[in-house]
Image: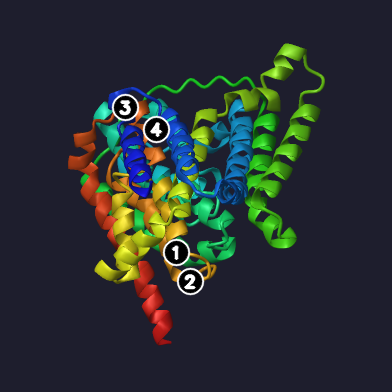
């Protein structure tokens, strides 16, 4: 049975990885993978009641993550339909290439920590298309946005799906991840950023920006800052109430829903609907939520049959050093989706072995969050930019991968160096 489930998992995983050549949405492969793995487990199990109990125990963990993502996506969509991101992007006025690269990268770094790396990549890519006419220049800027967004998401509990998984799973706490990873994540961006700035010269050929808004300044500003406030408040809410993070996120959704109802209550029904929470919910990427369900269910099945425990023992016996194992997992995340990798590590090593905020979990958040920048297909932000700007895989490998790698290594060494200094004091 174990061998059959592993084979099914490998086939399903390949289908997810080869989403674009196969032209089959990865959500389809993930859902089938999760359900088929558990079905095979149930069919071959001698104790069906125990199998059902294992699945039942797994579901709250999965639902916590899915509800959290649903709430976060709703708030982001509400900001977007109110054109709130225009408030941020309108601040950028410089025509110097180096200054623009620095400004957009730093903005993406901090924006990603609040919104998440995928949303930030899409927002910043849209901005670059308005600002920069030259295709080659825009590709360089967009590629740096990938590195910046992934680095920014790694130090925030809500900045990357994998970091959110670790936070919801009680592997890390919100304030410790910020304190421990902010500087290493910043180094991960600064090193490639300064290399790239050194290569750039002159000013860019600007497009003529014609921005027409459907909303007024007050509406854009109110929804943007209220939405960001609701997102930032989620870790505080969890600290105060000790309730699951999705409750804090749903509190934010409720506040945003009420605010938009009051804000547009005097408008005609059709005009009111386009700014409503109901409309925002219809725009959510539901396929991504189903993808996460399938992946987490499949990895949970591998944990239930003991495969991940055996994998942990194998890695400990062959590689030995935990820091090196996590470092290699980060590199692997540039090829393989980081969500199942992190889910697998969480099942391989329990909280009994490594308590909340142990260095293994903090380092995993960094490596899984930033390692994907080494290839354009290695992160959700990279895939989004790849689709928007039609970046070729091998162009990214030639121009960006090495810069992303040295940034990844520099950030990792910074984190390990800080740990060593703290241990010697």
Label 2 Cα neighbours within 10 Å, binned few <14 / some 14-19 / many ≥20: few
Position of residue 87 measured from the top left corner of the image (x, y, whole percent): 57, 35
- Determine contact: label 3, label 4, CB under 8 Å: no
- Write down the residue under mark 2: 353
User: In this image, 350 relative to 332: left or right?
Assistant: right
Q: Can you tell which quarter of the image residue 389 is in?
A: top left
Question: Looking at the image, which residue is at 55% across and 31% down?
Answer: 86
* Count of numbered marks: 4
- Write down the residue under mark 4: 384
Question: Looking at the image, which residue is at 49% across and 65% down?
Answer: 350
Residue at the outermost bottom position: 425
Position of residue 141 measured from the top left corner of the image (x, y, whole percent): 32, 38
Measure how far apart labels 2 and 3 are at the Cα level: 39 Å
Label 3 Cα neighbours within 10 Å, binned few <14 / some 14-19 / many ≥20: few
Measure how far apart labels 1 and 2 are at the Cα level: 6 Å
Q: Can you tell which quarter of the image residue 284 is in?
A: top right
- Write down the residue under mark 3: 20
Q: Which mark is residue 349?
A: 1
Identify the element where label 3 is drawn: helix
Position of residue 145 measured from the top left corner of the image (x, y, whole percent): 37, 42
Measure how far apart labels 3 and 4 are at the Cα level: 13 Å
């Amino acid at each position: 049975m174990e061998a059959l489930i592993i084979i099914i998992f490998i086939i399903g995983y390949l289908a997810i990885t080869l989403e674009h050549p196969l032209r089959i949405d990865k959500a389809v492969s993930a859902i089938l993978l999760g359900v088929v793995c558990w079905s095979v487990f149930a069919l071959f199990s001698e104790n069906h009641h125990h199998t059902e109990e294992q699945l039942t125990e797994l579901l709250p963990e999965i639902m916590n993550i899915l509800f959290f993502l649903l709430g976060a996506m709703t708030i982001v969509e509400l900001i977007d339909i109110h054109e709130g991101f225009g408030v941020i992007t309108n601040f950028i006025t410089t025509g110097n290439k180096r200054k623009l690269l620095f400004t957009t990268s730093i903005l993406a770094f901090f924006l990603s920590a609040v919104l998440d790396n995928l949303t930030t990549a899409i927002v910043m890519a849209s901005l670059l298309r308005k600002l920069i006419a030259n295709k080659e220049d825009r590709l360089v800027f967009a590629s740096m946005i990938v590195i910046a967004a992934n680095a920014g998401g790694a130090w925030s509990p809500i900045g990357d799906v994998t970091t959110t998984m670790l936070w919801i799973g009680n592997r890390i706490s919100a304030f410790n991840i910020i304190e421990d990873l902010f500087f290493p994540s910043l180094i991960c961006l600064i090193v490639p950023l300064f290399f790239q700035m050194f290569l750039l010269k002159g000013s860019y050929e600007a497009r003529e920006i014609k921005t027409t808004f459907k909303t007024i300044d007050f509406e854009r500003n109110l929804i943007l800052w209220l939405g960001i406030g609701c997102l930032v408040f989620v870790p505080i809410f969890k600290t105060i109430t000790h309730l699951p993070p999705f409750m804090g996120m749903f509190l934010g959704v409720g506040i945003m829903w009420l605010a938009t109802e009051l804000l547009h209550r005097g408008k005609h029904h059709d005009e009111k609907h386009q700014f409503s929470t109901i409309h925002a919910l219809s725009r959510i990427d539901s396929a991504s939520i189903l993808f996460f369900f399938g992946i987490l269910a499949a990895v949970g099945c591998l944990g239930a049959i003991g495969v991940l425990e055996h994998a942990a023992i194998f890695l400990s016996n062959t590689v030995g050093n935990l820091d090196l194992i996590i470092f290699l997992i980060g590199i692997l995340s540039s090829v393989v989706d980081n969500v199942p990798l992190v889910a697998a590590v969480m099942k391989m090593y329990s909280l009994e072995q490594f308590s909340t905020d142990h260095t293994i979990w903090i380092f995993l958040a960094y490596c899984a969050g930033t390692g994907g920048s080494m290839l354009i297909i290695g992160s959700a932000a990279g895939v989004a930019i790849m689709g928007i700007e039609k970046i070729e895989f091998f162009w990214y490998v030639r121009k960006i991968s090495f810069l992303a790698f040295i940034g990844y290594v520099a950030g990792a060494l910074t984190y390990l160096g800080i740990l060593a200094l703290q241990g010697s004091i």
